[in-house]
Amino acid sequence: MPLVGFEPTISVAEGLQTYALDRAVIGTGEPQYCFLHLMTPNNLYYIILYYIILYYIILYYIILYYTILYYIILYYINIV
């Protein structure tokens, strides 16, 4: 398509720079992690709550595993 008089030509370097800036603004580029913004009192509460819930979920599955193992052992002891 031929250029019209009011359309500026964009150099390759400028196009790449604009593309990189667009990706940074949109958030589709490589993520940059910074956890300092998570340390507000409200977010800190949810982080602590998350780890407490995670702890109890893991504890539940450990207890479940050993309970099942216990009954399996009892089953085989009674059979043999």
Image: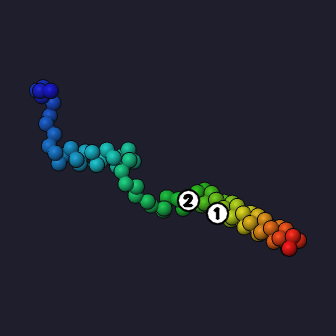
The amino acid sitting under disc 1 is Tyr
Q: Nearer the viewer, residue 52 or 44?
A: 52
User: Which quarter of the rendering shows the C terminus?
Assistant: bottom right
Seen in the picture, residue 80 relative to 13 is either above or below; the reply is below
The correct choice, above or below, for 19 with respect to 44 in the image is above
Using a 10 Å C-alpha cutoff, classify the residue at mark 1 as few (fewer than 14 neighbours), some (14 to 19) or many (20 or more): few
Spot occupied by residue 15 in the image (x, y as percentages of width and height) = 21, 44
Name the element at disc 2.
loop
Whether residue 73 is visible to the viewer of this picture, yes or no, is: yes
Query: Which is nearer the N-term, disc 1 or disc 2?
Result: 2
Quadrant in the rendering for residue 76? bottom right
42 or 80, nearer to the observer: 80
In the picture, measured across the screen, residue 44 lies left or right of residue 61, that is left
54 left or right of 18 in image: right
Q: Is residue 2 left or right of residue 50?
A: left
| Callout 1 touching callout 2 (CB < 8 Å) | no
Most extreme residue toward the front is 80
Callout 2: 10 Å neighbours few (<14), some, many (20+)? few
Q: From the viewer's perspective, is 63 left or right of 30? A: right
What residue is drawn where x is 53% and y is 59%?
38
Kind of residue at badge 2: Thr
Residue that numbered label 1 is attached to? 51
**Residue 64 place in picture, x, y as percent:** 76, 64
Q: Give the residue number, with chain letter if any, for mark 2.
A: 40
Q: Locate residue 32: give its quadrant.
A: bottom left
What is the quadrant of the N terminus in the image?
top left
Q: CA distance from mark 1 to mark 2?
A: 16 Å
